[in-house]
Structures are given as structure tokens and as C-alpha cells.
Amino acid sequence: MILLLIDLMIVRTSIELGNALRARRRELGLAQEEISGVIGVNRRVIGELERGKGTVQLQIAMEAARALGLDIELAPRGK
């Protein structure tokens, strides 16, 4: 099997995750309201997620990433 990774981004903080999700949403031309409607949360939650607010539930972050066509993968850190 061949795996091709394009635009791989390493995310280590909630702020970096929020920035990545915001960038992808904007790239797709979507509003926060559209993403919130797809995953069933208030638009305010998407705003908090994009600002890196640490209290947003992990499940919501994962659903938002999935709705934006992004995968979250874990890999050992290189030394």
C-alpha cells in the first residue's frame, strides 16, 4: 500500500489545532455556522475551537476535523 501525505501539519497545541481547522474551513469557503450545523453544535463552539480554547471537548474537535475532510493521525515524535 502506498500512502501519500500532502500538506502534513504537526499540531502540538490547541491553538495550532484551531488555526489548522480555521484555515481548512476558509480554504473550503465554509462559514462557522455551516460546520456547526453539520456536527450539531452551536456556532460559538466552533469559534472557541478555532481560537484554541482548551475546554472544547476532544470529540467535537475530531468531528469538526472530519467534517472538514481532515484526518487526525498520531505518530511517534522523531528525535
Image (tube, helix red, strand yellow):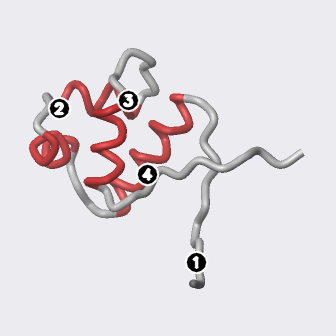
Residue 59 position within the rendered picture, expressed as x and y whole percent measured from the top left? 31, 33
Reading the image, the residue beneath label 2 is 43
**Disc nearest the viewer among 2 and 1:** 1
**Residue visible at 45% across and 36% down in the picture:** 18
**SS for dot 1:** loop
Asked if labels 3 and 2 touch by Cβ distance under 8 angstroms, the answer is no
Tell me the CA gap for discs 2 and 3: 16 Å
Give the number of the disc on residue 23. 4
Q: CA distance from mark 3 to mark 1?
A: 26 Å
- N-terminal of the pair, mark 2 or mark 3, is 2
Q: Where is residue 56 drawn, in percent x and y?
A: 34, 22
Q: CA distance from mark 2 to mark 1?
A: 34 Å
Report x, y in % for residue 19: 49, 41
> In the rendering, at what x and y percent does residue 26 appear?
34, 55
Q: Residue at x 17, y 32 (%)?
A: 43
Q: Residue type at mark 2: give it.
A: Arg
Q: Earlier in the sequence, mark 2 or mark 1?
A: 1
The amino acid sitting under disc 4 is Ala
